[in-house]
Amino acid sequence: MYAGVLSCIDASNRSVAVKMFSGGEDLSSDQAFWDQVQEYSEVRHPHLVELHEIDPSQALIVTELLAGDWGQAIVSGPLPVSTVAAIGRQALEGLRQLHKHGLIHGRISPRTLLHD
């Protein structure tokens, strides 16, 4: 579904990730998808990526930029148990906040768990 992610500096001088979508379906006209993205953008929590801007007409989302994902980190070998426990705790805290707002993530994996 992602066509790519670009690292950029926005007009407010923030480091951001610009996520562009493409694929078999035209997401620019998928109102249900963009309504859900809008709902996610209104949820704030230290363990959830902050959405800065949504542009359905260009099928892109601008979020805060983080250093990487845990999928990249585990390729180099096992992580210490304390690190895995901390990642799990932080992920669950973020998910709990989404659930309080009636939202679900739906794609939890090491590649979707980001870190600074």
Image (spheres, rainbow, N blue to C red):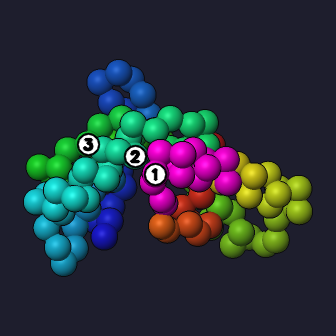
Percent from the top left, x then y, of residue 1?
A: 31, 70
Sooner in the amino-acid sequence: mark 1 or mark 3: 3
Q: Residue at x 10, y 60 (%)?
A: 29
Q: Gap in Å between the C-alphas at discs 1 and 2? A: 10 Å
Name the secondary structure under disc 1.
loop
User: Hey, what amino acid is under mark 1?
Assistant: Gly
Residues drawn in magenta: 92-105
Question: Mark 3 belongs to which amino acid?
Answer: Ile
Mark 2 is on which residue type? Tyr
Nearest to N terminus: mark 1 or mark 2: 2
Question: As drawn, is 9 to the left or to the right of 110?
Answer: left
| Residue at the top extreme of this rendering | 12
Which residue is disc 2 drawn over? 40
Q: Quadrant of residue 26?
A: bottom left
Residue on which the image places disc 3: 54
98 drawn magenta: yes
